[in-house]
Amino acid sequence: MTTENPSQQTSLHEETRAIWDQNATFWDDKMGEEGNDFQRILVNPASERLLNLQPGETVLEIACGNGVFARRLIQLGARVVATDFSAQLLERARARMPEQADRIEYRLVDATCEDQIVALGTQRFDAAVCNQAIMDMTEIDSLMRGIRQVVKPGGRFVFSLCHPCFNYTGMTSCVEESTVDGEIVTTYSVKITKYLHNGPQKGIGIIGQPVSQYYFDRPLHVLFNACFRAGLLLDGLEEPSFNSPHDGSQLGRAFSWKNYPEIPPVLVARLRVPG
């Protein structure tokens, strides 16, 4: 990802926040109580396995959106502080479960501001999680440094994002049809034309959303070096795909990820705080 100068980055960051405020109602309606297929089939199971939550643990969620995973975390017995930099998304999250407001503390926190993360409490959390949001952030070093300080020694930080190798703005989805031994064979693949140096680009998270959002694609070395610079240790990875009969493969749009069972659209990682 190319580096913006400070004034350009600040302007882009505020534009990104405004976009998410504008999309908040649409995203909340589409995600609903339990999330879309990406959330339910790919993100949640992998994140839960890597988090390995124990009853009564306190978890920080970064970029909680409309609260889908925060609600799941309390079902698993956790106490949750759920944060987002979009006031509109937080409003939608709070409205979805007023009867359980005492079990989830929603806070307006900018994940690109280390001080705001640290203000939540040094070594307060047993674990932290950030689902499908790191590729939406203008910079991530502040997030990693903040996580390093608020998660207890030995604690874990799990994040998921659109797979940096296969599901980003520099790839093209492909469908080819050929005849093999008298049978028509359809092959689904992705074409990669650019990977190492991608600048911010607008894209679509959910078809039909009011405003296109920015993506800040990072190759693997940029992504994980930010973690390592903060002193976090990588000790778990998953690459979930729609590869189960229950996933509804071969359904929907021709270019739906459900038709690409061998290509993971999501990467989920677990980092540890040394201790």
Image: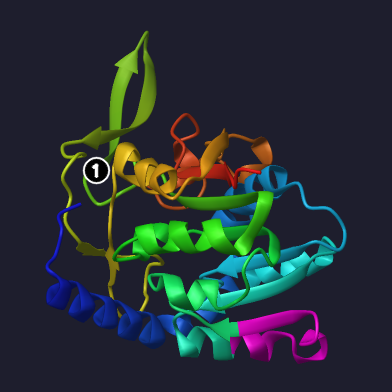
Q: Residue 69 placed where, x, y %?
A: 65, 65
Report whether 91 appears left or right of 52: left
Tell me which amino acid carries mark 1.
Thr
Badge 1 is on which residue? 172
> Which type of secondary structure does the marked residue at label 1 adopt?
strand
Residue drawn where x is 30% and y is 49% of the image: 168
- The location of residue 248, given as percent across then percent down, is 60, 45
Q: Residues within 10 Å of mark 1 (few under 14, many from 20)?
A: some
> In the displayed image of the protein, which residue is found farthest to the top?
181
> Residue 125's spot in the image, x, y percent?
69, 64
Q: Is residue 141 above or below residue 31?
A: above
User: Which residue appears at 69% of the width and 67% of the height?
Assistant: 124
From the viewer's side, name the closer residue of 267 and 79: 79
| Quarter of the rendering occupied by the C terminus | top right
Quarter assignment of residue 215: bottom left
Q: Is residue 197 visible?
A: yes
- Give the residues in magenta: 92-106
